[in-house]
Amino acid sequence: MEEVDVEPAITVIPGVDSSQRHMGFVWGRGDILLYETQHKGTGSGEAGCPLIHVVRKDEDIYSPILRKLFNESHHIFVGLQQSKEETSSKTKRPQFVSVSKNYRSVIRACMEELQEVAVSTRDAALSAQCCSQVSILLAVELIWNLCEVLFIEAVPAGSLLLHLLDWVRLHKADVDEKAQEVLQSDSPARHHKYWDVVICYVLQGRMDEARQMLAKQASQQPAARSMFKTLDSLMKKMPVFNPAGSQTLTEFDLKWRHWHEECELHLQDGSFSSNSNLETICKILLGHEETLLNQKEQLSTWYHFLVSRLLYTHPSVKPTELHYYAQSSMDLFLDNRSDPEPLDSILLVAFEFDIHQVIKDCSIALSNWWFVAHLTDLLDHCKLLQSHNLHFGSNLREFLLLEYASGLFTHHSLWQLAVDYFDHCPEFGRIYLELQIERVPLDTERKALKVLRICEQRQLAEQVRSICKIMAKKAVRNNRLGSALSWSIRAKDAAFATLISDRFLQDYCARGTFSDLDLIDNLGPAMLLSDRLTFLGKYREFHKLYGEKRFAEAAKLLLSLMTARIAPRSFWMTLLTDALPLLEQKQVIFSADQTYELMHCLEELMSGETEPSDKRTVQEEDIETTKVELLRLALARNLAAAIVKEGTVDSL
Amino acid sequence: MEYINAKFVSQKISKTRWRPVSSTSLQQPEVFATGSWDNEDNKVSIWSVAEQGMQEEYEGDPQLLCEYKHDGDVMDLQFLDQERIVTASSTGSVTIFRHYQNSQTLSVNQRWERAHYHSCDNAPCTGVVCNSPEIVTVGEDGRINLLRVDHKGIVRTIDNADSSTIHAVTFLRTTEILTVNSIGQLKMWDFRQQGNEPSQILSLTGDRVPLHCVDRHPNQQHIVATGGQDGMLCIWDVRQGNMPYSLMEAHSAEMWEVHFHPSSPDHLFTCSEDGSLWHWENYTTTDTPSFLQGGRNATITSRSTIVPASINQSLISSWLTSDSTKGRLETTNMLPSQTMSVNSLDVLGQCLVCGTDGEAIYVTKQVPM
């Protein structure tokens, strides 16, 4: 048994006093039912809480805006699985990057919508909930973006820093707002946020924008023009690695060192000593740790500090060196906090390129499996996950997808998405689907048809039978025998078809006519599903023939029903009684042989009825005996007439 | 293939319908209604695709105008007129909603609570069709109801019209309807007759495949298209015979809706559980000019029983052409990629809207005709 990673969170159930009573519980598919038991712990014997509580861990799937996230990402997921078989993994990297960007754009779209709702709604609780969801999505997107840069794109040194800069810029977009504010004011150079904006630009490596802003200040102070010009030229000359260019990393490194020395020179000989702001900027360009740390407010996060620090001290950083810098940056930046936030530790672990730990930490920190399931699946496609067998046999990707999909299945509406996820879990997906699909509530026939289609496409024959049986039983209970029959035909359920045919026959015996003629008359090849059903169809045919006065054929059919043993023994009496009018006709319908067979059937029936008849009243006994007498008489008379007819030689 | 927009709406869409445009105006439809299903709170919603500004290309999303809570799944939805919508619910009730365009609100105008019912349970009402002021509804209880707007009770009920579930209904004439059921039969009912028996039953021989949808040709009342569980499209001529005129293999799963285009009936649209929406185009290559083809001039077709030999081919609708050299059928899948089941579609003018189980609505305003 593994150790627990995190202390489990405690949820207090309102109304249940856990110190006084014991609680009982039972697991549902995604939630727990809790109730108070009668077992008294301590305390008096007064009545406890009469309620049953449903405790649910994952509230996110019930949020209407987040539902869009689930649907759209499902679309992307299915597309990714289907494109798997095409090309080799080398050429697929850009495709995976674009899939990753798709996922992220979906997250961003959701974030924007949540933000809009949080701002525009008047309901305080809803607003608070939206805000917290926005912050979780922000964190999720941040982590995903970093994983995309480090793991999926996996760029080498040189470009690595450029990508990290993009990453930071994307997540620190408030500098643009501030810049707008400053530029739109009357005198930008004198705005109180002016220097903040310039420094932010420099920290993010956006030299051109910084220079443009500085130009505004320069024009205001013609006396210090040379100072501004020097700084401007330093900033302009800063070498930036061009991945597409012909310059190698070593050449770039050399150039950068030269530039760095030049900056150092300028700082040493006091070119900027008269203007503290410009001096700060120069120190930043040199990557002075203290100066950078002083800009905590502009940096606001340790990973921004990390990237800025790397930009100005070691721009050709290699991926393997990242984690040293990351650890030290975090320590320097967060020096007075004892425990880092979950987000910080996840990012740190990402910088260490420990994918499994990233996934593990994210699983613990988030309440919904959505993020880890999709990210792991994408990383698995990039072949970045070692096959890591867990205790219960499946690999990490499958485990997370199964957990996520199981959570979806408990939702009244999103269960259809979960089916596709199970499809792409080769080891256990099918079993999970078998267990879950039977528990989808079936209120309407249309929903049952959709569920059946899912089962039939995956050859889940057991589930098809059980669902059809449920629907058929419901139909029988509501006396919709036609519906019930069409369900049993779909399931090819002979036993149930027999049951329904028996009901029809009972109805006939009770009322003397058939109900639902449109069904029985049009059974077609489905008649062959069960013997009883065939009998029903044929019996109805007999009635039709009789109605059309085609007596000879009717007689033949009737006899064949008994002799071929299609008719159930209990119905033979009725059949023989039906034969009576045919026997009583003026013309001879049954031939001698046929009459012998009928008599044989009657005797068989009589000999079989030797069980005690105390369930029948005396009156019924009388009726039975009379019937048999009549039959015997009619048969005898018919036999006589038939023998005479067959013995007669035509006088022609 | 022209671009078709998807909008995710956080509810599985069971029905979409365009609001009818008045026949005199040449405008394209701008407003459509959707109904949801399988939610704890289902809704009827009204959306607008009106363009802002003078752009030629429609690129925006449908905007939600208003919505209203609906009890039970929306099994079917029809516009009664410009302002009123009739819905059929899985609880067995039929409701008329009124859309107030000034305030953009919806409210319940009238409701028949247990129009369809079982002895023990609720029976979903599966189909509704209207010809103002009359409404005909059918349900899983095998019952057909004739309702009238502003009339509180049910005008006429045909109990036990069918021993199995009736899935869809359409008007053939003002007093005649056609229903399809789950044992593969089409039944014609005439309301002028008093009994509870259908006036005609048509079915496929062989396997009794449940039929899910039916639509009548807009100009020729004897031509009907049906789709069923096996995804096959059948064209029937209800005047003659007991058999479909043609059977075409189409989808790989249940076909949920089939629609003839109301003004260009050579175009047919079908949508299915397999996630595709097909546009069928029937090209006839006869020499006769188009104004003599297929039912444009209704008086000619209804009067003549013996069709003059010279224009024989052209007066029979292109759908019933048995000579394959004279016509060809082209189908196009209109949705860009594999989606979940497309439950519903509606087409009017050049605009098409459809809703899926992936909680998305697709709208295009440039259906290639």
Image (cartoon, coloured by chain):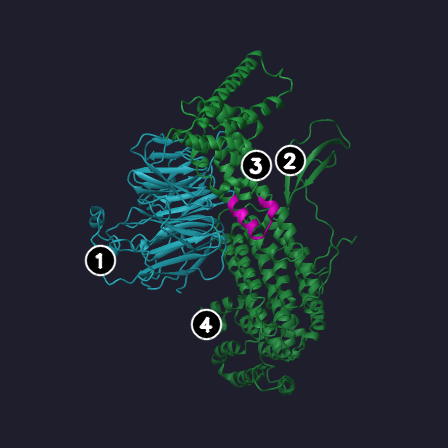
Residue B291 in percent (x, y) is at: 22, 58
| Subunit ID for the residue under disc 4 | A
Q: Give the residue type at disc 3.
A: Phe
SS of the residue under disc 2: loop
* Disc 3 crowd, CA 10 A, few/some/many (<14, 14-19, 20+): many
Residue assigned mark 1: B291
Q: Which residue is mark 4?
A: A187
- Precedes in sequence: disc 2 or disc 3: 2
Chain given the colour green: A
- Compared across the picture, whether B63 is left or right of B217 comes to right
Residue A354 vs residue A213, the one in the foreground: A354
Mark 2 is surrounded, within 10 Å at the Cα level, by few (under 14), some (14 to 19) or many (20 or more) other residues, namely few
Q: Nearer the viewer, residue B309 or A484?
A: B309
Mark in the foreground, 2 or 4: 2
Q: Quadrant of the C terminus of chain A?
A: top left
Relative to A286, A509 lies left or right: left
Does residue B18 appear in the picture of this structure? yes
Q: Position of residue B343 (x, y in %)?
A: 45, 50
Label 3, on which residue?
A496
Q: Nearer the viewer, residue A311 or A177?
A: A311
Mark 3 residue element = helix
Give coordinates of residue B274: x percent, y percent: 49, 54
Amino acid residing under circle 4? Ser
Q: In the orientation shown, which residue stands out farthest toward the front?
A: A652
- Camera-side mark, 2 or 1: 1
